[in-house]
Image (spheres, grey):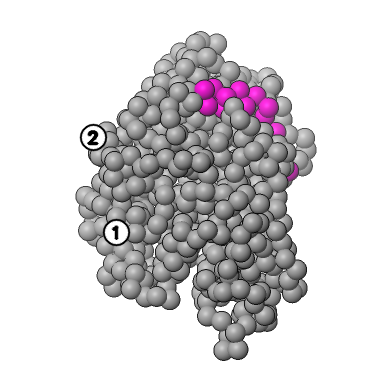
């Protein structure tokens, strides 16, 4: 049964969405890799957790050079994950459990095995086949230098030279990511028409929305200018305010086209992956005729510091206020270090991750929880021979990539693979000391991180204090903050200092850790009060 829409505003306005990294969630056929049927088998858990929707990473046909983000056919399911019949069963089962289903959309590039790119390789320069991608002649007398000096996000240059059908060295093609992911040319009407076809294909199958990969990078700057000398830092540095490869003004035409298609369907949502730090430029993606929501990653970049966290919250809210959109909040995903590890690891990192989870879950807007975050999983230091991320090879073994954050979810039992798979081993090895972190171990433990998330989500979904779209900040001791949802009695306080502090007035609803024996809020702890 399709979930009932909220009467006052769209269902996504204050939804809690759970990200499923499909390879690492649940394996149904004992091949060591998670799949669609595995997700179906665990929908009851997601309903019990108390989330409103799930977002699944790409399950399209793919050679898996970048674990599904290199799409060979955007309108079919890769056999590794199932088939269209299983996908349709997932949509129906999710709706029966009261869950919306959001799927990944990858419009920036295709796989190099896509039929379009294979046709481009056998066609001539200037042909319609090559016009679907970004092909250019090289620089230098013999064209043996890349067309510009752009780097790939995965390391190395963003250009690869092809061999022409006559056997001679030929043109270069652009790939902002791996060489197996050639960038599409979004000035080409045929490219736009094909995406419209893809959107309708999945919307007609009942999906509730799309998460748009690299939403800020689809369009390229006119002329593809090179960086000025010393303008660009390390290949994985996202801290620069502007990057000429991304956030080009023409990208908004693409998002208006996508929105125009989605508007023909009821209650569907568009969420953009937007690595843009300027608040005003970020807001442009969320104008009324573009995306509904945009991932703002400020909280994922903030350290465990009250001033940093508060600034991240204020910037995130200011970035959407002018265009009337709702903020989104996330502490982790498949591309970034897990909070437990980011905040110090071990017991310290766990305390801080639990505290910041309460801070996040009390905020107005949309929450995204990454699978395993609710279990307090850390990132895992994997051996070199286990690494699968293309970043590892592309960086010349200087960047270990994102595999540490993608180790499969532990479900039950006392040893790997903890119920994730019946295969001899999972696609990434699981630690031998995770028995206490399994879903099974945490479900009946009232003090576990899973129980904290379940309790917090229950309060968020039922308490009248979780209304409104603004925050009011209280005075607080140094290294702490407290905020209130205006018009309600709900207060959230964080102690990020090194000493216990008095609680704000009110009845304690939930704490991320026990209070001191004399009722103070300890260091690295958060509390909700009414």
- Quadrant assignment for the N terminus: top left
Vertical comparison of 466 with 94: above or below: below
Residue 37 is situated, as x and y percent measured from the top left of the image, at: 25, 46
In this view, the residue in front, 108 or 473, is 473
Residue 145 is situated, as x and y percent measured from the top left of the image, at: 64, 27
Image point (63%, 69%), residue name: 493
Circle 1 residue: 420
Residue 518 is situated, as x and y percent measured from the top left of the image, at: 60, 89
State which tag comes first along the sequence, 1 or 2. 2
In the rendered structure, the answer to whether residue 511 lies left or right of residue 410 reads right
Image point (70%, 50%), residue name: 315
The answer to whether residue 366 is visible is yes
- Neighbor class of circle 2 (other Cα within 10 Å; few <14, some 14-19, many 20+) is few
In the rendered structure, the answer to whether residue 431 lies left or right of residue 471 reads left
Circle 2 residue: 85
Describe the element under mark 2 as helix, strand or loop. Answer: helix
């Amino acid at each position: 049964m399709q979930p009932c829409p909220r009467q006052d505003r769209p269902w996504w306005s204050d939804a809690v969405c759970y990200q499923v990294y499909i390879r690492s969630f649940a394996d149904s056929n004992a091949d060591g890799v998670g799949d669609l049927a595995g997700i179906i088998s665990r929908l009851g858990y997601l309903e019990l957790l108390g989330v409103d929707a799930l977002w699944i990473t790409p399950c399209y046909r793919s050679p898996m050079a970048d674990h599904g983000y290199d799409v060979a056919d955007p309108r079919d399911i890769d056999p590794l994950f199932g088939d269209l019949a299983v996908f349709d069963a997932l949509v129906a089962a999710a709706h029966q459990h009261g869950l919306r289903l959001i799927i990944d959309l990858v419009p920036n590039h295709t796989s190099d095995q896509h039929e379009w790119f294979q046709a481009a390789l056998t066609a001539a320069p200037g042909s319609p086949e090559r016009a679907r991608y970004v092909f250019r002649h090289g620089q230098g007398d013999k064209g043996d230098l890349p067309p510009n000096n752009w780097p790939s996000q995965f390391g190395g240059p963003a250009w690869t030279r092809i061999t022409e059908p006559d056997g001679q060295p030929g043109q270069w093609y652009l790939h902002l990511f791996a060489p197996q992911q050639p960038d599409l040319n979004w000035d080409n009407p045929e490219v736009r028409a094909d995406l419209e076809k893809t959107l309708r294909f999945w919307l007609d199958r009942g999906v509730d929305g799309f998460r748009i990969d690299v939403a800020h990078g689809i369009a390229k700057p006119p002329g593809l200018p090179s960086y000025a000398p010393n303008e660009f830092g390390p290949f994985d540095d996202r801290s620069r305010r502007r990057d000429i490869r991304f956030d080009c003004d023409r990208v908004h035409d693409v998002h208006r086209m996508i929105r125009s298609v989605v508007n023909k369907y009821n209650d569907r949502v568009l969420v953009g992956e937007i690595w843009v730090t300027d608040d005003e430029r970020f807001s442009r993606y969320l104008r009324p005729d573009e995306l509904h929501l945009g991932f703002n990653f400020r909280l994922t970049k903030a350290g465990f510091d009250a001033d940093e966290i508060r600034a991240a919250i204020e910037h995130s809210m200011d970035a959407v206020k002018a265009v009337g959109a709702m903020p989104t909040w996330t502490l982790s995903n498949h591309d970034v270090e897990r909070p437990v590890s980011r905040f110090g690891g071990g017991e310290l990192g766990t305390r801080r991750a639990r505290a910041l989870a309460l801070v996040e879950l009390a905020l107005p807007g949309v929450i995204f929880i990454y699978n395993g975050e609710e279990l307090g999983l850390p990132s895992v230091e994997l051996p070199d021979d286990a690494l699968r991320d293309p970043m590892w090879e592309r960086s010349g073994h200087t960047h270990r990539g994102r595999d540490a954050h993608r180790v499969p979810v532990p479900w039950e039992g006392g040893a790997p693979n903890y119920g994730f798979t019946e295969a001899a081993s999972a696609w990434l090895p699981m630690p031998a000391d995770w028995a206490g972190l399994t879903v099974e171990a945490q479900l009946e433990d009232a003090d576990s991180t899973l129980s904290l998330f379940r309790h917090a989500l229950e309060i968020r979904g039922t308490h009248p204090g979780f209304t409104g779209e603004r925050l009011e900040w209280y005075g607080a001791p140094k290294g702490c903050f407290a905020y209130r949802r205006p018009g309600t009695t709900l207060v959230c306080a964080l102690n990020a200092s090194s000493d216990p502090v008095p609680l704000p007035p009110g009845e304690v609803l939930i704490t991320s850790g026990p209070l001191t024996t004399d009722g103070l809020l300890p260091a690295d702890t958060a509390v909700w009060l009414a």
